[in-house]
Image (spheres, rainbow, N blue to C red):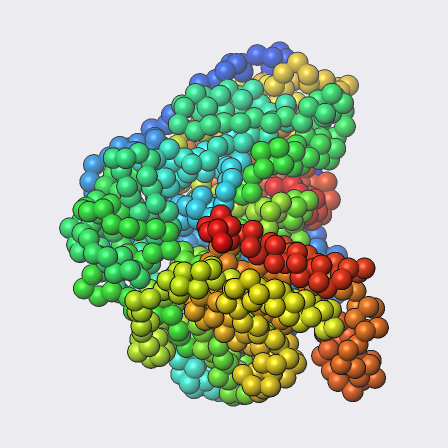
Amino acid sequence: MATVEFTPITAQDTAQLLRFITCGSVDDGKSTLLGRLLYDAGMVPDDQLAALARDSRRLHAEAPEALDFSLLTDGLDAERQQGITIDVAYRYFHTPRRSFIVADCPGHEQYTRNMATGASNAELAVVLVDARKGLLPQTRRHTYICALMGIRQVVLAVNKMDLVDFREDIYAAIAHEYRELAVQLGITTVHGLPVVAPDGDNVGRRSARMPWYQGPCLLELLEAADTAATQAVDFRMPVQWVNRPDASFRGYAGTVCGGSIAVGSEIVVQPAMRRARIERIVTADGDLSKAVAGQAVTLTLDREIDVSRGDVIADALRPAPVADQFAAHVLWMGDEPLLPNRAYWLKVGSRTVNARISSIKHKVDVNTQAELAARRLELNEVGYCNIDLDHAIAFESYADNRTLGGFILIDRQTHATVGCGMLDFALRRAANVHWQHTDLDKEARSASKGQQARCLWFTGLSGAGKSTIANLVERRLHALGYHTYMLDGDNLRHGLNKDLGFTAEARVENVRRVAEVAHLMVDAGLIVLVCVISPFQDERRFARSLFDEGEFLEVFVDTTLEECERRDPKGLYRKARAGEIFNFTGIDSPYEAPEHAELHLLTAGRRAEQMAEQVVEQLLAGMESHQSR
Amino acid sequence: MGGDEMKVAVSARGTCAFCSVSPGAAVLRLSFSARFPTDDRPRPGRPGQGPVKQRMSSMSHLDALEAESIHIFRETAAAFGRPVMLYSIGKDSSVLLHLLRKAFYPAPPPMPLLHVDTTWKFREMIAFRDQVAAAGDVEVRVHINEEGVRQGISPLVHGSAVHTDVMKTAALKQALDKYGFDAAIGGARRDEEKSRAKERVFSFRNAQHRWDPKHQRPELWHTYNTQIHKGESVRVFPLSNWTELDVWHYIRRENIPVVPLYFAKPRPVVERDGALIMVDDERFVLREGEVVQLREVRFRTLGCYPLTGAVVSSADTLDKIIEEMAASRSSERQGRVIDHDASASMERKKQEGYF
């Protein structure tokens, strides 16, 4: 039955590894093809085969003798009930020539992210098409995602040839049409073949029923595929771990993600651009004279320089570009939409930095590749975006190096992986706009005012009393001789922020601008009082991140919604309830209460003066350790 | 179920109850057979000593798997405050420990090992564990669910489900909470069982140690999301992409010591519910009609002895094991009684916090 002989014992030690994915819909017979492939490779043990025969009989009373190979690759309980594969599953098999890792990817409409996940490590894709239906929108979508994720080789399996009487003209037309599509999308190599998955035609052996097809079967194609196609050329190694067991040894451990390096070569540690030479390439099996892409090694250098996790060690003659602003494709995987200007963590290689999508240039319809205008990205949408980081990083274009060009985006609150992206190029702004050094700094500017610069950030519902309390605080500080400024959200909307509305996106941008202005004023040495509703945790956390330790004091003015509504000083709650204004915080837009505010003012039953005094006291107490007035 | 599939080729018969298992069995070190030369690299049993060598530019698939696992170990140590390696004494744990040592060489491993002892492990496993601990380069912590011991939980009396739940799943949670571990490295492989095929390398667990198969983090490239809140944790599986055969090939290539129970030898067994159960100590109670026989058997997986079926085999070297596996037509976990409880039972156990 099995058409491939068992592996000779030694082949396993030297056989190479190919990672590939399968794409197609449930109806195309993808699970069946994969099951059949495992079966033909001799990978289905007797006990599983017995279970398969039993399950096949139970589920298919009409053909009790036939084996339903799709059952071999069926996964979790929930999926079995739904009858579809909903996530990425990995399968393993080998032949005498190769070991294979297959990412089994779903073809269902809403699961673009699973396919991207499966494709991210794959060197080749098997795209399945039903001979009766030809190319479908999903064929185009799958191929686009493969290309987006860096796959350059595709095997096109035209399945169910038995249902079109094994006609060569039907196969040839589909293969021809697909080749044109693939070229458009940047796939360089396409192998087509006609198959009948349940019967195994052209899967593990060549088919006698389609003598007009002279090429290799699927298994032979997979054995022959080029595995070096996706390898990067220039030496790069992200530092994962600084290995320092004692004072005599200091090594930098990581996995080489591009090129190779020899002992004695000059390297540069990026982004700081410190130079050194490779002294040793240490492994537990003895030192190497040379390290190549894919190897996990520990490097020691010929001199002591500062190297930490997240740095990239690169060939000094061909270093990686360094930048903090990029154009990139982003595939959104979060349930909540991606909002421009919201802060996320971005992880690339072993480095994690703060990032924001500064603009979405367009989103890409994954079915047609049409470019559409977009202000946000929803789950499973792809956008071409500009990205800002808070630190410059060493990177590569994704087409050159998947490790240093591929990144994930992490939600700072839920810690979910909400997106992935492929860096394209650095924006010129980053290279051309330099930070101008100034001789006077914040300390000098605040010292001349006899104070320490601070940001007091008042957050709370509309009508909670933020401005009232802040106003009293400012008067008191002024009377004590401090230099202050008050930034009021409402007032700023008349000028700096007058182009912004009240949607979630606009609120994020509103808070970002206010925070940046406050940051400038603190840099000028002032005590700044900010009064903005700032309803989202994420943006307040971003604001805080701009300041040094102890410089930022979050003041939560905590008044109940009922009380704010009762006061309604500007008549806004009434309008919101009447449906005259939308996105009003507390009514139809959420307020996320702070969890770790420096000051939590429960306003019920307290006078504003009393609370203002409390704020002043806490502010001055924080300065006291440094100065006495 | 496994009964009629298991070929009962009786090689030796005997009725004595507790013979032939030497207490505190020595750790077996195996040498390569000259008939099966591997590559030209010298491979010490313990990593650390070896001359400078030149590698081929294209890595073999075992090299690729090894490098990937080392990468995962390093990422775990760098990103988590209190990592631990779960050590179950089996072959996968032996490979894990070997990789752990390699990943941080020349430093000693920066994390302890944790063995959750159900008190029903084979005696040779415990002896092997103690020998690993005696090596001194890595700390081995042992945790036993004392409450379960007080209740007298036994697989023979309470069955596999209750025993596993109390002495393994609950015990593991206790130990993780007790030491505040935020990342637990385990040796599970995706090829072991259907529900594991979709498991992540870094698998998120909530504060109650639960796994939610519907809300797993997408995992792209080798860029792992290691962010968690206090109280939450991850399970990390560096051997995700290894197959059973890869494990044995690697054990042979690297000359890694494993528990002698993997090698065939005459052992006292009884046939029970279609499986061959080894009589490992005096707690084993014979049912009516059961006869202890001395048969040449070995184990493909190791667990609690009353729940682990032996296979009849004469494979007493690594080469023979690999040869046998290549010709084998049954899957690895067939010998495990707990997997047969119900279809998809592993998935259910995982959701409840089983590894």
Residue sitting at x 18%, y 64% = A317
Q: Is residue A115 left or right of residue A8?
A: right
Residue A502 in sight from this viewpoint: yes
Q: State the residue lying farthest toward the left.
A: A264
Depth order, front residue of A42/A626: A626
Q: Is residue A479 left or right of residue A254?
A: right
Q: Is residue A77 left or right of residue A98?
A: right
Q: Is residue A101 left or right of residue A479?
A: left
**Where's residue B201, x and y in %?**
52, 51
Residue sitting at x 20%, y 50% = A278
Count the labels in the image. Answer: 0
> Vertical placement of A245 versus B283: above or below?
below
**Where's residue A49, x and y in %?**
61, 50
**Where's residue A112, x and y in %?**
57, 71
**Where's residue B231, x and y in %?**
62, 45
Depth order, front residue of A611/A176: A611
Residue sitting at x 37%, y 41% = B103
Residue sitting at x 65%, y 41% = B354
Depth order, front residue of A74/A199: A74
Residue A165 in sight from this viewpoint: no
